[in-house]
Amino acid sequence: MNRFILLCASFIVLGLNNSELYAQSISAEQNKKPGPGVYPFEDRTGFTPIYNRQNLGGWVMQDKGFWTVEQGEFVGRRDPLEKEDSWLFSSMEWEDFVLELEFFVPEKCNSGIGIRMPKDSAGSPDVHGYEVQISDLPQKKLTGSLLHHVESTGDNHHLPNQWNQLAIICEGDHIRVYLNRQKILDEHVKGSKKGRIGLQVPKDAEFSKQVVRFRNLRVKNLNPVASSVPLSYKGRPFVDAIHTAGPQVIPGKIECALYDMGGEGVAYHDVETENRGSGGLNKLPDHQRPHATPYEWAFRKDEAVDISYTKDFADFNHVNNYYIPGVNQFYIGWTENNEWLNYTVDVKVAGTYKIDALYANKDTAITFDVNQKPASTCKLPLSTGGFHNWNKAEIGTITFSEPGLQLLTFHYNKGNNFAWFEFTLVEKKHGD
Protein backbone atom coordinates (compact mmCIF):
# COMPACT_ATOMS: atom_id res chain seq x y z
CA MET A 1 0.00 0.00 0.00
CA ASN A 2 2.77 2.42 0.86
CA ARG A 3 4.54 1.64 -2.42
CA PHE A 4 1.30 2.26 -4.30
CA ILE A 5 0.81 5.64 -2.62
CA LEU A 6 4.39 6.60 -3.33
CA LEU A 7 4.04 5.53 -6.95
CA CYS A 8 0.83 7.59 -7.40
CA ALA A 9 2.48 10.56 -5.75
CA SER A 10 5.40 10.27 -8.14
CA PHE A 11 3.06 10.25 -11.13
CA ILE A 12 1.24 13.32 -9.76
CA VAL A 13 4.50 15.20 -9.23
CA LEU A 14 5.71 14.17 -12.67
CA GLY A 15 2.40 15.31 -14.17
CA LEU A 16 2.69 18.67 -12.45
CA ASN A 17 6.24 19.10 -13.64
CA ASN A 18 5.26 18.18 -17.19
CA SER A 19 2.36 20.70 -17.04
CA GLU A 20 4.75 23.39 -15.91
CA LEU A 21 7.18 22.49 -18.67
CA TYR A 22 4.33 22.51 -21.21
CA ALA A 23 3.15 25.94 -20.00
CA GLN A 24 6.70 27.23 -20.20
CA SER A 25 7.07 25.90 -23.74
CA ILE A 26 3.78 27.59 -24.77
CA SER A 27 4.94 30.87 -23.21
CA ALA A 28 8.27 30.61 -25.00
CA GLU A 29 6.46 29.87 -28.28
CA GLN A 30 4.24 32.92 -27.83
CA ASN A 31 7.25 35.12 -27.18
CA LYS A 32 9.12 34.02 -30.26
CA LYS A 33 9.67 36.59 -32.96
CA PRO A 34 7.85 35.91 -36.25
CA GLY A 35 9.67 33.45 -38.48
CA PRO A 36 11.10 34.52 -41.83
CA GLY A 37 7.90 33.76 -43.75
CA VAL A 38 5.37 34.79 -41.09
CA TYR A 39 3.46 38.05 -41.49
CA PRO A 40 4.99 40.38 -38.84
CA PHE A 41 2.14 42.87 -38.33
CA GLU A 42 -0.75 40.82 -36.97
CA ASP A 43 -0.98 43.36 -34.13
CA ARG A 44 -3.29 46.09 -35.43
CA THR A 45 -1.73 48.81 -33.28
CA GLY A 46 -0.71 51.89 -35.24
CA PHE A 47 -2.69 51.21 -38.43
CA THR A 48 -4.93 54.05 -39.62
CA PRO A 49 -7.46 54.11 -42.50
CA ILE A 50 -6.41 56.09 -45.58
CA TYR A 51 -9.86 56.54 -47.11
CA ASN A 52 -13.18 57.65 -45.69
CA ARG A 53 -15.40 54.85 -47.15
CA GLN A 54 -17.86 57.42 -48.53
CA ASN A 55 -16.21 59.28 -51.42
CA LEU A 56 -12.90 59.91 -53.18
CA GLY A 57 -11.86 62.66 -50.76
CA GLY A 58 -8.11 62.62 -50.19
CA TRP A 59 -7.48 60.81 -53.49
CA VAL A 60 -6.68 62.21 -56.94
CA MET A 61 -7.22 60.53 -60.32
CA GLN A 62 -4.57 60.45 -63.03
CA ASP A 63 -5.92 59.90 -66.57
CA LYS A 64 -9.48 58.77 -67.15
CA GLY A 65 -11.27 55.92 -65.48
CA PHE A 66 -14.53 55.32 -63.70
CA TRP A 67 -13.72 55.34 -60.00
CA THR A 68 -16.52 55.24 -57.43
CA VAL A 69 -17.05 54.34 -53.78
CA GLU A 70 -19.68 51.62 -53.36
CA GLN A 71 -20.56 50.09 -49.98
CA GLY A 72 -17.29 51.36 -48.55
CA GLU A 73 -15.19 49.96 -51.41
CA PHE A 74 -13.10 51.71 -54.06
CA VAL A 75 -14.45 50.41 -57.39
CA GLY A 76 -12.53 50.95 -60.65
CA ARG A 77 -13.72 50.45 -64.22
CA ARG A 78 -11.97 51.20 -67.49
CA ASP A 79 -12.95 54.13 -69.70
CA PRO A 80 -13.02 52.63 -73.23
CA LEU A 81 -11.70 55.92 -74.68
CA GLU A 82 -8.67 56.07 -72.40
CA LYS A 83 -5.30 55.15 -73.89
CA GLU A 84 -3.35 55.19 -70.61
CA ASP A 85 -3.65 53.35 -67.31
CA SER A 86 -5.99 55.07 -64.88
CA TRP A 87 -4.55 55.62 -61.42
CA LEU A 88 -6.25 56.74 -58.25
CA PHE A 89 -3.49 58.25 -56.07
CA SER A 90 -3.55 59.17 -52.39
CA SER A 91 -2.97 62.84 -51.66
CA MET A 92 -0.57 61.95 -48.84
CA GLU A 93 2.94 60.54 -49.16
CA TRP A 94 4.78 57.99 -47.04
CA GLU A 95 8.41 56.92 -46.64
CA ASP A 96 8.68 53.77 -44.51
CA PHE A 97 5.29 52.15 -44.00
CA VAL A 98 3.10 49.07 -44.04
CA LEU A 99 0.14 49.17 -46.42
CA GLU A 100 -2.67 46.67 -45.90
CA LEU A 101 -5.67 46.31 -48.18
CA GLU A 102 -8.06 43.75 -49.61
CA PHE A 103 -8.73 43.33 -53.33
CA PHE A 104 -11.40 41.54 -55.37
CA VAL A 105 -10.70 40.85 -59.03
CA PRO A 106 -12.04 38.46 -61.70
CA GLU A 107 -10.16 35.70 -63.46
CA LYS A 108 -7.63 36.72 -66.12
CA CYS A 109 -7.20 40.10 -64.48
CA ASN A 110 -4.65 42.87 -64.44
CA SER A 111 -4.33 45.64 -61.85
CA GLY A 112 -1.72 46.97 -59.48
CA ILE A 113 -0.79 48.96 -56.40
CA GLY A 114 1.48 51.97 -56.84
CA ILE A 115 3.87 52.76 -53.99
CA ARG A 116 6.36 55.57 -53.37
CA MET A 117 5.08 57.51 -56.39
CA PRO A 118 6.55 61.03 -55.92
CA LYS A 119 3.97 63.76 -55.47
CA ASP A 120 5.10 65.84 -58.43
CA SER A 121 5.43 62.92 -60.87
CA ALA A 122 2.93 61.93 -63.55
CA GLY A 123 2.90 58.62 -65.36
CA SER A 124 3.50 55.06 -64.24
CA PRO A 125 4.60 54.20 -60.68
CA ASP A 126 6.79 51.41 -62.10
CA VAL A 127 8.88 54.23 -63.65
CA HIS A 128 8.82 56.91 -60.94
CA GLY A 129 8.10 54.70 -57.93
CA TYR A 130 7.08 51.05 -57.89
CA GLU A 131 4.08 49.00 -58.98
CA VAL A 132 3.11 45.87 -57.06
CA GLN A 133 1.33 43.73 -59.61
CA ILE A 134 -2.11 42.10 -59.20
CA SER A 135 -2.60 39.51 -61.92
CA ASP A 136 -3.14 35.80 -62.61
CA LEU A 137 -1.64 36.11 -66.10
CA PRO A 138 2.01 34.99 -66.23
CA GLN A 139 2.73 37.27 -69.18
CA LYS A 140 1.66 40.23 -67.00
CA LYS A 141 3.70 38.97 -64.01
CA LEU A 142 1.90 37.34 -61.10
CA THR A 143 0.52 39.08 -58.02
CA GLY A 144 3.16 40.57 -55.76
CA SER A 145 5.77 41.12 -58.47
CA LEU A 146 7.51 44.49 -58.60
CA LEU A 147 6.76 45.33 -62.21
CA HIS A 148 9.93 45.66 -64.31
CA HIS A 149 12.06 44.87 -61.26
CA VAL A 150 11.56 41.37 -59.83
CA GLU A 151 8.95 38.61 -59.91
CA SER A 152 7.15 37.26 -56.86
CA THR A 153 7.67 33.66 -55.74
CA GLY A 154 6.03 31.00 -53.61
CA ASP A 155 2.26 30.98 -53.07
CA ASN A 156 1.67 33.98 -55.35
CA HIS A 157 -1.69 32.97 -56.89
CA HIS A 158 -4.57 35.04 -55.52
CA LEU A 159 -8.14 33.75 -55.38
CA PRO A 160 -10.27 35.14 -58.25
CA ASN A 161 -13.75 36.47 -57.43
CA GLN A 162 -12.92 36.46 -53.73
CA TRP A 163 -11.46 38.97 -51.32
CA ASN A 164 -7.69 38.65 -50.95
CA GLN A 165 -5.48 40.36 -48.39
CA LEU A 166 -2.34 42.14 -49.60
CA ALA A 167 0.31 43.72 -47.38
CA ILE A 168 3.27 45.76 -48.63
CA ILE A 169 6.11 46.67 -46.26
CA CYS A 170 8.59 49.39 -47.25
CA GLU A 171 11.59 50.04 -44.99
CA GLY A 172 14.44 51.98 -46.57
CA ASP A 173 15.52 50.03 -49.64
CA HIS A 174 13.75 46.87 -48.44
CA ILE A 175 10.32 45.95 -49.90
CA ARG A 176 8.33 42.90 -48.82
CA VAL A 177 4.94 41.72 -50.08
CA TYR A 178 2.55 39.30 -48.39
CA LEU A 179 -0.45 37.72 -50.11
CA ASN A 180 -3.04 36.30 -47.73
CA ARG A 181 -0.39 36.40 -44.97
CA GLN A 182 2.22 34.50 -47.01
CA LYS A 183 5.42 36.24 -48.06
CA ILE A 184 5.79 36.28 -51.85
CA LEU A 185 8.42 39.00 -52.37
CA ASP A 186 11.49 40.13 -50.45
CA GLU A 187 13.68 42.56 -52.38
CA HIS A 188 16.14 45.42 -51.92
CA VAL A 189 15.71 48.31 -54.37
CA LYS A 190 17.52 51.54 -55.25
CA GLY A 191 14.72 53.80 -56.47
CA SER A 192 12.20 56.20 -54.91
CA LYS A 193 12.08 56.23 -51.11
CA LYS A 194 8.98 58.39 -50.63
CA GLY A 195 5.69 58.94 -52.39
CA ARG A 196 1.99 58.30 -52.83
CA ILE A 197 -0.04 55.09 -52.92
CA GLY A 198 -2.05 54.33 -56.05
CA LEU A 199 -4.72 51.92 -57.34
CA GLN A 200 -4.79 50.93 -61.02
CA VAL A 201 -7.30 50.30 -63.78
CA PRO A 202 -5.30 49.15 -66.86
CA LYS A 203 -5.56 50.64 -70.34
CA ASP A 204 -5.68 47.36 -72.26
CA ALA A 205 -8.85 46.67 -74.25
CA GLU A 206 -8.83 43.03 -73.11
CA PHE A 207 -9.71 44.28 -69.61
CA SER A 208 -12.54 46.57 -70.77
CA LYS A 209 -15.15 44.65 -68.76
CA GLN A 210 -12.97 44.11 -65.72
CA VAL A 211 -14.10 45.59 -62.41
CA VAL A 212 -11.55 45.92 -59.59
CA ARG A 213 -12.48 46.47 -55.98
CA PHE A 214 -10.38 47.55 -53.01
CA ARG A 215 -11.37 47.91 -49.36
CA ASN A 216 -9.95 48.22 -45.84
CA LEU A 217 -7.00 50.34 -46.94
CA ARG A 218 -4.86 51.22 -43.95
CA VAL A 219 -1.30 52.29 -43.29
CA LYS A 220 1.09 51.96 -40.39
CA ASN A 221 3.80 54.61 -40.51
CA LEU A 222 7.11 53.01 -39.56
CA ASN A 223 8.73 56.43 -39.00
CA PRO A 224 5.91 58.20 -37.16
CA VAL A 225 6.18 61.75 -35.91
CA ALA A 226 6.01 61.85 -32.11
CA SER A 227 2.51 62.77 -31.04
CA SER A 228 1.11 64.46 -27.94
CA VAL A 229 -2.43 64.52 -29.35
CA PRO A 230 -4.81 63.02 -26.75
CA LEU A 231 -5.63 59.40 -27.55
CA SER A 232 -9.33 60.16 -27.16
CA TYR A 233 -9.27 62.63 -30.06
CA LYS A 234 -10.95 61.20 -33.19
CA GLY A 235 -10.25 64.03 -35.67
CA ARG A 236 -7.63 63.90 -38.40
CA PRO A 237 -5.74 66.50 -40.44
CA PHE A 238 -7.56 67.98 -43.42
CA VAL A 239 -6.53 66.75 -46.87
CA ASP A 240 -8.08 67.03 -50.29
CA ALA A 241 -6.92 67.07 -53.91
CA ILE A 242 -5.35 70.53 -53.46
CA HIS A 243 -4.16 70.40 -49.86
CA THR A 244 -2.25 67.14 -49.68
CA ALA A 245 0.42 67.67 -47.03
CA GLY A 246 -1.57 66.58 -43.97
CA PRO A 247 -0.91 68.40 -40.68
CA GLN A 248 -0.13 72.10 -40.95
CA VAL A 249 3.34 72.97 -39.71
CA ILE A 250 4.59 75.24 -36.93
CA PRO A 251 6.63 77.42 -37.36
CA GLY A 252 4.48 78.56 -40.22
CA LYS A 253 1.03 79.71 -41.20
CA ILE A 254 -2.09 77.91 -39.98
CA GLU A 255 -4.96 78.47 -42.41
CA CYS A 256 -8.18 78.77 -40.43
CA ALA A 257 -10.32 77.04 -43.07
CA LEU A 258 -8.10 73.94 -43.01
CA TYR A 259 -9.37 72.74 -39.64
CA ASP A 260 -9.40 69.01 -39.00
CA MET A 261 -11.79 66.47 -40.46
CA GLY A 262 -14.14 64.75 -38.05
CA GLY A 263 -17.31 66.83 -37.91
CA GLU A 264 -19.33 68.62 -35.29
CA GLY A 265 -18.16 68.11 -31.71
CA VAL A 266 -14.89 66.54 -32.83
CA ALA A 267 -13.12 68.83 -35.30
CA TYR A 268 -15.26 71.90 -34.63
CA HIS A 269 -18.26 73.35 -32.87
CA ASP A 270 -20.57 75.64 -34.81
CA VAL A 271 -23.94 76.76 -33.46
CA GLU A 272 -25.63 76.45 -36.88
CA THR A 273 -25.81 73.45 -39.18
CA GLU A 274 -25.57 75.41 -42.46
CA ASN A 275 -22.31 76.67 -43.93
CA ARG A 276 -23.49 80.23 -44.54
CA GLY A 277 -20.64 80.99 -46.92
CA SER A 278 -19.83 78.00 -49.15
CA GLY A 279 -23.23 76.44 -48.57
CA GLY A 280 -25.27 79.63 -48.75
CA LEU A 281 -24.04 83.02 -49.93
CA ASN A 282 -21.56 81.63 -52.44
CA LYS A 283 -24.31 79.76 -54.27
CA LEU A 284 -25.55 83.13 -55.55
CA PRO A 285 -24.28 83.88 -59.07
CA ASP A 286 -22.89 87.31 -58.17
CA HIS A 287 -20.79 85.75 -55.37
CA GLN A 288 -19.23 83.17 -57.68
CA ARG A 289 -16.52 85.58 -58.72
CA PRO A 290 -14.63 85.05 -62.00
CA HIS A 291 -11.25 85.20 -60.23
CA ALA A 292 -12.24 82.06 -58.29
CA THR A 293 -13.33 78.55 -59.31
CA PRO A 294 -16.00 76.11 -58.11
CA TYR A 295 -13.41 74.83 -55.66
CA GLU A 296 -13.35 78.21 -53.86
CA TRP A 297 -17.08 78.81 -54.25
CA ALA A 298 -18.04 75.54 -52.56
CA PHE A 299 -15.11 74.82 -50.24
CA ARG A 300 -16.22 72.41 -47.49
CA LYS A 301 -19.83 73.39 -48.22
CA ASP A 302 -21.34 70.38 -46.44
CA GLU A 303 -19.75 71.21 -43.08
CA ALA A 304 -21.27 73.62 -40.59
CA VAL A 305 -18.27 75.93 -40.21
CA ASP A 306 -19.01 79.13 -42.17
CA ILE A 307 -16.32 79.57 -44.83
CA SER A 308 -15.88 82.04 -47.67
CA TYR A 309 -13.08 83.58 -49.71
CA THR A 310 -11.87 87.12 -50.40
CA LYS A 311 -13.68 88.74 -53.34
CA ASP A 312 -12.92 91.64 -55.64
CA PHE A 313 -16.07 93.63 -54.86
CA ALA A 314 -15.98 93.02 -51.09
CA ASP A 315 -12.36 92.91 -49.93
CA PHE A 316 -10.34 94.82 -52.52
CA ASN A 317 -12.55 97.70 -53.65
CA HIS A 318 -11.97 100.03 -50.70
CA VAL A 319 -9.05 101.89 -49.15
CA ASN A 320 -9.77 101.03 -45.53
CA ASN A 321 -7.74 97.84 -45.33
CA TYR A 322 -4.83 97.93 -42.92
CA TYR A 323 -3.52 94.89 -44.82
CA ILE A 324 -4.39 93.51 -48.25
CA PRO A 325 -5.22 89.78 -48.09
CA GLY A 326 -4.45 87.38 -50.90
CA VAL A 327 -6.92 86.86 -53.73
CA ASN A 328 -9.23 83.90 -53.00
CA GLN A 329 -7.96 83.76 -49.42
CA PHE A 330 -10.22 81.41 -47.44
CA TYR A 331 -11.57 82.68 -44.13
CA ILE A 332 -14.09 81.67 -41.50
CA GLY A 333 -16.88 84.12 -40.77
CA TRP A 334 -20.41 84.46 -39.39
CA THR A 335 -18.80 83.64 -36.04
CA GLU A 336 -20.86 83.10 -32.90
CA ASN A 337 -20.04 82.91 -29.22
CA ASN A 338 -18.28 79.81 -27.92
CA GLU A 339 -17.45 78.31 -31.30
CA TRP A 340 -14.13 76.51 -31.80
CA LEU A 341 -11.94 74.71 -34.33
CA ASN A 342 -9.36 71.93 -33.93
CA TYR A 343 -6.10 71.63 -35.84
CA THR A 344 -3.63 68.75 -35.69
CA VAL A 345 -0.34 70.60 -36.13
CA ASP A 346 3.22 69.38 -36.59
CA VAL A 347 5.43 71.43 -34.27
CA LYS A 348 9.00 71.17 -35.54
CA VAL A 349 10.69 72.93 -32.60
CA ALA A 350 9.49 73.12 -29.00
CA GLY A 351 9.46 76.64 -27.60
CA THR A 352 7.62 79.95 -27.44
CA TYR A 353 6.11 81.45 -30.59
CA LYS A 354 4.68 84.86 -31.36
CA ILE A 355 1.35 84.79 -33.15
CA ASP A 356 0.35 87.09 -36.00
CA ALA A 357 -3.27 87.07 -37.16
CA LEU A 358 -5.05 88.10 -40.34
CA TYR A 359 -8.51 89.11 -39.16
CA ALA A 360 -11.32 91.57 -39.76
CA ASN A 361 -13.73 93.62 -37.63
CA LYS A 362 -13.74 93.54 -33.80
CA ASP A 363 -10.88 94.15 -31.36
CA THR A 364 -11.73 91.17 -29.22
CA ALA A 365 -10.01 88.38 -27.30
CA ILE A 366 -9.48 84.84 -28.56
CA THR A 367 -7.91 81.81 -26.87
CA PHE A 368 -5.92 78.72 -27.83
CA ASP A 369 -5.66 75.33 -26.15
CA VAL A 370 -2.83 72.85 -26.69
CA ASN A 371 -3.77 69.20 -26.26
CA GLN A 372 -7.06 70.24 -24.64
CA LYS A 373 -5.42 72.45 -22.01
CA PRO A 374 -5.55 76.29 -21.98
CA ALA A 375 -2.36 77.68 -23.51
CA SER A 376 -2.81 81.30 -24.64
CA THR A 377 -5.16 84.27 -24.47
CA CYS A 378 -4.64 86.75 -27.31
CA LYS A 379 -6.00 90.21 -28.06
CA LEU A 380 -6.84 91.52 -31.52
CA PRO A 381 -5.35 95.01 -31.22
CA LEU A 382 -7.84 97.20 -33.11
CA SER A 383 -11.27 97.27 -34.68
CA THR A 384 -10.94 97.42 -38.46
CA GLY A 385 -14.36 98.97 -39.06
CA GLY A 386 -15.93 96.12 -41.04
CA PHE A 387 -16.00 92.42 -41.83
CA HIS A 388 -14.09 92.98 -45.08
CA ASN A 389 -11.56 95.48 -43.75
CA TRP A 390 -8.53 93.38 -42.91
CA ASN A 391 -5.63 93.77 -40.52
CA LYS A 392 -2.50 91.71 -39.92
CA ALA A 393 -1.09 92.14 -36.41
CA GLU A 394 0.82 90.46 -33.62
CA ILE A 395 -1.71 89.27 -31.06
CA GLY A 396 0.24 87.31 -28.42
CA THR A 397 2.42 84.29 -27.76
CA ILE A 398 2.02 80.58 -27.18
CA THR A 399 4.37 77.86 -25.91
CA PHE A 400 4.62 74.31 -27.22
CA SER A 401 6.53 72.26 -24.65
CA GLU A 402 7.22 69.33 -27.00
CA PRO A 403 7.89 68.91 -30.72
CA GLY A 404 5.74 66.63 -32.84
CA LEU A 405 2.02 66.40 -33.44
CA GLN A 406 -0.08 68.60 -31.15
CA LEU A 407 -3.80 69.39 -30.99
CA LEU A 408 -4.33 73.15 -31.29
CA THR A 409 -7.83 74.40 -30.47
CA PHE A 410 -8.90 77.90 -31.50
CA HIS A 411 -11.77 79.43 -29.46
CA TYR A 412 -13.59 82.53 -30.69
CA ASN A 413 -16.78 84.54 -30.26
CA LYS A 414 -19.23 86.59 -32.33
CA GLY A 415 -18.16 89.37 -34.63
CA ASN A 416 -15.01 88.54 -36.63
CA ASN A 417 -13.63 87.03 -39.80
CA PHE A 418 -10.41 85.00 -39.42
CA ALA A 419 -8.11 84.00 -42.30
CA TRP A 420 -4.88 82.65 -40.77
CA PHE A 421 -2.47 82.68 -37.85
CA GLU A 422 1.29 82.73 -38.34
CA PHE A 423 3.53 81.22 -35.65
CA THR A 424 7.13 82.46 -35.46
CA LEU A 425 9.66 80.94 -33.04
CA VAL A 426 11.05 83.49 -30.60
CA GLU A 427 12.63 81.24 -28.00
CA LYS A 428 13.54 77.56 -28.17
CA LYS A 429 12.69 75.36 -25.25
CA HIS A 430 15.74 75.05 -22.97
CA GLY A 431 17.79 72.03 -23.98
CA ASP A 432 16.41 71.81 -27.52
Image (spheres, rainbow, N blue to C red):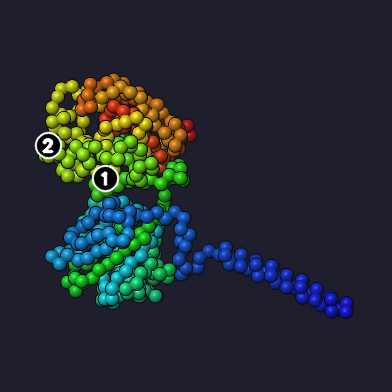
Could you tell me residue 348's position as x and y percent?
39, 39
Q: Nearer the viewer, residue 26 or 251?
A: 26
Amino acid type for the residue under numbered disc 1? Asp
Q: Which residue is mark 2?
A: 286
- Residue at the image position 80 percent from the left and 73 percent from the top: 9
Split into 4 quadrants, where in the image is the N terminus?
A: bottom right
Could you tell me residue 7's position as x and y percent?
81, 77
Alpha carbons under labels 2 and 1: distance apart: 21 Å
Could you tell me residue 105's position as x and y percent?
29, 70
Locate residue 371 relative to residue 393 in the image: left or right.
right
Mark 2 Cα-neighbour bin, 10 Å: few <14, some 14–19, many ≥20:
few
Return the mark for residue 395.
none
From this view, report whether residue 373 is shown above or below residue 54: above
- Residue at the image position 13 percent from the left and 65 percent from the top: 81
* Res 234 visible: yes
The answer to which quarter of the image holds residue 205 is bottom left
Could you tell me residue 36's position as x and y percent?
47, 68
From this view, report whether residue 129 is shown above or below residue 372: below
Q: Which residue is mark 1?
A: 302
The answer to which quarter of the image holds residue 297 is top left
Locate residue 14 relative to residue 51 in the image: left or right.
right
From this view, report whether residue 371 is shown above or below residue 115: above
Mark 1 Cα-neighbour bin, 10 Å: few <14, some 14–19, many ≥20:
few
- Residue at the image position 43 percent from the left and 31 percent from the top: 375
Split into 4 quadrants, where in the image is the C terminus?
A: top left
Q: Nearer the viewer, residue 91 or 36?
A: 91
The total of numbered circles placed on residues is 2
- For label 1, the SS is loop
Q: Nearer the viewer, residue 175 or 250?
A: 250
Amino acid type for the residue under numbered disc 2? Asp
